């Protein structure tokens, strides 16, 4: 799971924030803090689908299920195990 979180964190730092050296904590709020905006959220979802081979519903792109790297990793793992 650590690898999933690290991969997504690096993507957000380099592609979304344009700050490749920025470290994102696994429990750091992404959406609710404004770190990831609605435009970047779609790009992030597409990255996750391509990178990890899972499908994300549009209804899941919210702060309840998609707000931290921990939440994202758990979601990805649950989809990969099906």
Image (cartoon, rainbow, N blue to C red):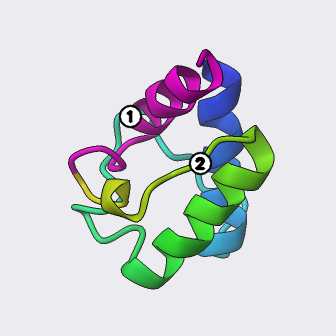
Q: Nearer the viewer, residue 11 or 52?
A: 52
Magenta residues, as a range?
64-82
Q: Is residue 13 left or right of residue 14?
A: left
Looking at this view, is 27 or 47 the one in front? 47
Residue 71 in sight here: yes
Does residue 64 appear left or right of residue 29 in this picture? left
In the image, which disc is placed on residue 30? none
The residue under the point 66% across, 31% down is 4
Q: Viewer-nearest of labels 2 and 1?
A: 2
Image location (x, y in percent) of residue 33: 25, 63
The quadrant of the rendering that contains the C terminus is top right
Report which quarter residue 37 is drawn in: bottom left
* The label number, if any, that marks residue 55 in the structure image: 2
* Residue 80 placement (x, y as % from top left): 64, 24
Considering the whole magenta stretch, tell me its main secondary structure. helix
Mark 2 vs 1, N-terminal side: 2
- Is disc 2 in contact with disc 1, using a CB cutoff of under 8 Å? no
Q: Position of residue 40 (x, y in %)?
A: 52, 76
Residue 26 left/right relative to 14: left
Residue denoted by label 1:
71
Residue projecting furthest to the front = 82
């Amino acid at each position: 799971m650590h690898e999933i979180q690290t991969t997504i964190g690096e993507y957000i730092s380099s592609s979304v924030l344009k700050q490749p050296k920025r470290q994102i904590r696994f429990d750091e709020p992404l959406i609710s803090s404004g770190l990831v905006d609605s435009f970047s959220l779609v790009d992030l979802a597409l990255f996750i689908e391509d990178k990890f081979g899972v499908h994300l519903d549009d209804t899941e792109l919210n702060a309840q299920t998609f707000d931290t790297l921990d939440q994202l990793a758990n979601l990805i793992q649950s989809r990969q195990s099906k």
